[in-house]
Image: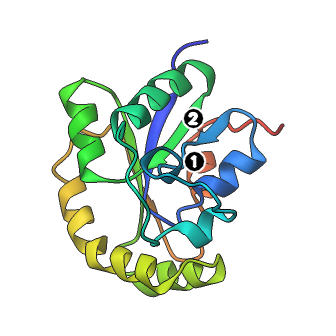
Amino acid sequence: MTNGIIIAGFATCGKSFLSNKYSNVIDLESSDYKHDNTNIKSIEAKKGTKREINKEWPNNYYRAINEAVKKYDIVLVQLMPQHFDYFDKNNIKYSIAYPNINNWEEVKRKCIERGNNENFIKGLEEVFISYYEDLLQRNYENLYIINENETLEKVLIENNIELLKG
């Protein structure tokens, strides 16, 4: 097997859904690497809460990404400018999945539905436009825009990315 593809996806794009549905997809939830998650039960509920930063962050996350592309066809990662810096500096190919820039209210609704707290939602809103403007300057291979009532799953299938049920 050749190395898998990396897709950096903004929150609510459907990364967790894809990794739960398809055997050749992994969602590398960044907070598992960034924070001490002792006594935290729900992935979505912990987002936006104050926790201690792991001293290995972000290198532990980059190591996990580099290992995951050897085992999975699709590696879904957190969308953050600092990760793009790492990918670009190390000539690592990646694509980006981002909600349509006019769909903030849908992103907010999805956050509420999945149990994210107000701090998390406020933080996303603060970076929603600036992250989009930043990503346009990056060296990505593909930019997958998730339009209203669309899913990352649908967009990948339409772009002939193979998803294996497992």
Q: Residue furthest top?
A: 1
Residue, x 19% and y 63% (percent of image)?
Answer: 133
Specify the amino acid type for callout 2: Ile
Seen from the viewer's position, the closer of residues 82 and 164 is: 82
Q: Is residue 149 left or right of residue 129?
A: right
Colouring method of the image: rainbow
Q: Nearer the viewer, residue 7 or 38?
A: 38
Residue 118 horizontal/vertical position (percent): 46, 86
**First in residue order: circle 1 vs circle 2:** 2
Q: Which mark is residue 156?
A: 1
Q: What residue is pinned by disc 2?
A: 74
Quarter of the N terminus within the rendering: top right
Give the quarter of the image for residue 90. top left
Amino acid type of disc 1? Answer: Leu
Mark 1 or mark 2, which is nearer to you?
2
Tell me how many marks there are: 2
